[in-house]
Image: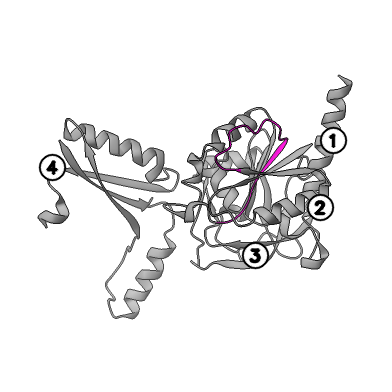
Amino acid sequence: MKFGVVIFPGSNCDADCYHAVSTVTGQDVRYVWHEERDIRDLDCLLLPGGFSYGDYLRCGAVARFSPVMKSLIDHAAAGKYIIGICNGFQVLTEAGLLPGALYRNDHLKFVCKPQRLRVERTDLAFTHFYTAKQVVEFPIAHGEGRYYADPETLAKLEANHQIVFRYCEEDGAITDAANPNGSLNNIAGICNAEGNVLGLMPHPERRCDRLIGGTDGKKLFKGLMETLRVSAISQRLR
Amino acid sequence: MRYHVQIEITLKPTVMDAQGTTIEKALHKLGHASVTNVRIGKFVTLEIDAAYANCAKNAADEMCKELLANPIIEQYDVQVSETNPEVAA
């Protein structure tokens, strides 16, 4: 099993992702420079947070044209896993791998704080180690994390259960007060219809060690690792 | 023929423009009480070599759809002219 962490010019959470994934899963991780095209050795790709291409034009708008993105689209089409965190989520929406868009927070401020989230889907490769409606805490750090989709797209996302994480109160209540950026329906993270591409604004990789505030993010990487392990075994048996 | 293209990109009317709202409040505080509907956008200028003005317009439309605007949240307006509007002004 092998993980890859993509580095665009301006990515700045790549080392955190690398550290979290290698420590939590104990598997091989390698960096993938944005100009690379051959990523066939990888089972899961992580698009880290940061400011790819200086956030020029719109967050993630220019990263979409990096050479690695074509291979990344093939990787997704093959049913392999992708996690886009923060700027990585923005890149995935700009590339059309996830629906909707992320734009300026409603209060215009960059928000950087621990944030409670409710896990809405626990049948995904990424989330099956969490319990239904479990409240977790991941940090958020973004200026443009406000999720928007037109009413039809939003209704489809809800009907297909593609909303994976929602901003919530301590007790799991979904309220406006718990919404840190004005995202529609308190959306913090979504997946594609197939469930192999996940995008989220909060940072699970920053909650994988007690030393830096908590371990709620570990289950995401452990769950994915378990899925990959089981599918590798079943492939060998076939 | 070298055409001068001006592109205005703004958030769709259905998408709440937090910057516009904040600037509007600031203008009210400065005493401009009658100001409403402030919207903030981006302005892009570029030049295109094309046979006709409509070819330049079509090329610019394509660029907006592909990169310059995000059609999910933004709308755009393309103006094409033979003379540089900034110099002419």
Q: Which chain is home to disc 1?
A: A
Residue A203 place in picture, x, y as percent: 68, 57
Discs 1, 2 touching: Cβ within 8 Å: no
Q: Secondary structure at mark 2?
A: helix
Q: Residue furthest top?
A: A238
Pick the front one: A157 or A28: A28
Q: Is residue A155 visible?
A: yes
Q: Amino acid at mark 2?
A: Thr
Q: Amino acid at mark 4?
A: Glu
User: Distance from label 2 to label 4 (Cα)?
Assistant: 60 Å
Residue placed under numbered mark 4 in the picture: B82
User: Distance from label 1 to label 4 (Cα)?
Assistant: 63 Å
Q: Amino acid at mark 3?
A: Ala
Q: Residues within 10 Å of mark 1 (few under 14, many from 20)?
A: few
Q: Residues within 10 Å of mark 3 (few under 14, many from 20)?
A: some
Q: Residues within 10 Å of mark 2 (few under 14, many from 20)?
A: some
Residue placed under numbered mark 2 in the picture: A23
Residue placed under numbered mark 1 in the picture: A229
Looking at the rendering, the stretch of residues picked out in magenta corresponds to: A33-50
Residue A12 place in picture, x, y as percent: 60, 57
Q: Which chain is home to disc 3?
A: A
A91 shown above or below B28: above
Quarter of the figure with residue A135:
bottom right
